[in-house]
Amino acid sequence: MPSTTPDNQVHWFRNSSPYINAHRGRTFVVMLSGELLDGPRLPTLVHDLALLNSLGIKLVLVHGARPQISARLAESGIESTFEQHMRITDSAALNGVMAAVGALRLKLEGLFSMGLANSPMYNAGIRLISGNFVIAKPVGVRNGFDYQHTGEVRRIEVDAIRQQLSNGNVVLLSPLGCSPTGELFNVNAEEVASTAAIALGADKLILMGNDLRLADSNGDMVRELSPQQAGKLLADDQLQDNGVDRQLTAACHAASNGVGRAHLIDANDDGALLKELFTRDGCGTLVTRETYETLRGARIDDVGGILELIEPLEADGTLVRRSRELLENEIQRFAIIERDGMVIACAALYPFPDDKTGELACVAVHPGYRKGERGAQLLAYVERRAKEQGLTSLFVLTTLTAHWFQQQGFELAGVEALPGARKSLYNWQRNSKVFVKIL
């Protein structure tokens, strides 16, 4: 009998379809480190890039050349001098830079031209376009050092690049920039990549290299970072000297200046680019400007944020009014969800240990964040706290949100279900409905 269970390839392909739809028509800037360009995985990676192109993704490639330049200069007997992690490029060294960059450009053009019948790029017909898209300016003299032909990016020729992308071509940018005076400058490839991603309004900046793995103090891969967290890592200067610092700096710069997501990917993992882009968990490190949320117990400095959150609900009668003084005295009862320093949701637990029950109170979610199940997250957090205190049930009093509490497993009960101490405080004029949930 034929199997009705899809094999791994079919399962993966089916689950990749949401990402295929999401990425179509998007602009990705992909940087390939110089070390990667001399590695054995480059041809396979080119196949994967060709696949992205065939799926309608607009690709701008940036290639590094640091090891190749060093090798060229060594062959010519020219000693490389670095200051502030930048190579000082004199006239003799510039010739070596041009030779190394030119050779890599031709190598990539050759790989993107593959089209044998037994090749993954059969009938691909990709055009890899390079040109004077990077405009540079000299670094100049800094701290007494004349950097000569070492430059930095002045601007990216955005319109020219977009025209090529609209024609279905892949654009290649090299770590060489030209100036309005006709000079050439050796520029940092990571800077080219991040600046191009920002200027083009790219949806992603993808930085790939050999052993490009960002790990924490336990050796575990760091899966997600905010630009602020990335900046702190760089400031602590605890990263390995394998290019991660340069790549992370570029990712941080891009994510802080309008690029939605920046990815650091270890190219030694076969198919890493596809895994990162077309699976839920990915395989690299994501740097994103999207703010993070934290669910935690409230502190005294959260009082202002909670008051601001609950004030509109108090005004329309959804919540009972609480003074700042009362809230300060009861702050230990509260849990909040904080988003980038803003309190966007809160809830409180008032235990009645003698009756082994507790009151769920002051449940509030900011109007702009009511579609993300944050109320349910807070409820789960309060339930855990209640169980830790030995409580076996929760009750809630509500006038306007009865249906939501029923959806969360609460059942309608009468005022008689309240513990004695709470029953004596029941406001008959408010006439709240009482709901109970067994934990």
Image (cartoon, grey):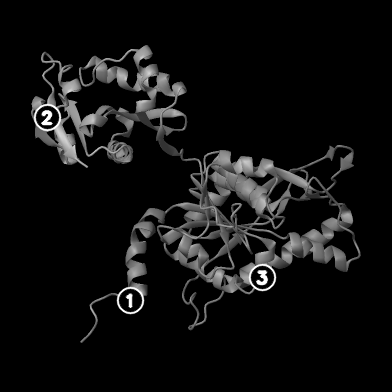
Q: Mark 2 packing: few (<14 Cα in 10 Å), some, or many (20+)?
A: some
Q: As drawn, is 292 to the left or to the right of 368?
A: right
Residue highlighted by disc 2:
417
Q: Amino acid at mark 2?
A: Ala
The residue that appears at 29% across and 75% down in the rendered structure is: 6
Q: How many marks?
A: 3
Query: Please, is residue 23 above or below residue 181 in the view?
Result: below
Q: As drawn, is 361 to the left or to the right of 184?
A: left
Q: As drawn, is 165 to the left or to the right of 372?
A: right
Q: Nearer the viewer, residue 296 or 233?
A: 296
Q: Mark 3 packing: few (<14 Cα in 10 Å), some, or many (20+)?
A: few
Comes first in the chain, label 3 or label 1? 1
Q: Nearer the viewer, residue 200 or 79?
A: 79
Q: Name the disc covering residue 107, or none.
A: 3
Residue highlighted by disc 1:
7
Q: Amino acid at mark 3?
A: Lys
Residue 193 locus on image (x, y percent): 62, 50
- Where residue 147 sits, quadrant-wise, is top right
Q: Secondary structure at mark 1?
A: loop
